[in-house]
Amino acid sequence: MADRISTAQRSANMRRIKGRDTNPELLVRRLAHAMGYRFRLHRKELPGKPDLVFGPHRKVIFVHGCFWHQHEGCKVGRIPGSNVGYWVPKLRRNTERDAAARAALEALGWEILTIWDCETREESALRARLRSFLGGRAGEG
């Protein structure tokens, strides 16, 4: 059986989780910049405040944590076994908010790419996905 941590320790762990400038997001930003793309960050006037906004291209990228945004099929994206009454509604609200933001962006004519935390572990595959979504550029790194 897995070791359980105390409620106080779990609470302390959760407080330290950032909503922006996470390691996966920084990696995606670094790669896109190295490929020659320039972007804006977290534009508040767009639904869902996308992590990266490529204005002239009408494209946005969300970098989602597998747990917080419930990545289907990912072992990290599962609901915790304790305090289910808290986690189920909270995580459901997150996914509903994501879906609403996505629909609103699409209605405004934006193309959307969601990159999951677990997909950032293989840099070459991530680079290929970015290139496919954004289009290749001459002299990209």
Image (cartoon, rainbow, N blue to C red):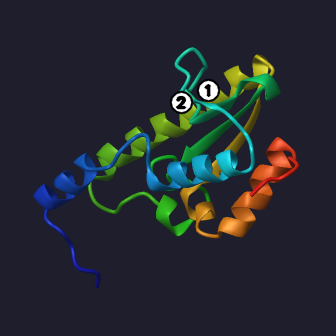
**Residue 40 on image: x %, y %:** 60, 28
**Residue identifier under label 2:** 97
Would residue 130 appear left or right of 9 to someone viewing this image? Answer: right
Q: Are marks 1 and 2 in contact (CB under 8 Å)?
A: yes
Question: Helix, strand or loop at disc 1?
Answer: helix
Q: Nearer the viewer, residue 3 or 32?
A: 32
Residue 61 visible, this orientation = yes
Would residue 76 appear left or right of 121 to someone viewing this image? Answer: left
Would residue 114 appear left or right of 66 to someone viewing this image? Answer: right
Q: Nearer the viewer, residue 114 or 138?
A: 138
Q: Amino acid at mark 1?
A: Ala
**Residue 73 on image: x %, y %:** 62, 64
Report which quarter residue 97 is drawn in.
top right
**Residue identifier under label 1:** 101
Q: What is the count of numbered marks?
A: 2
Kindly identify which numbered label has been placed on residue 111: none
At 50% from the left and 52% from the top, the residue drawn is 65
Q: Residues within 10 Å of mark 2 (few under 14, many from 20)?
A: some
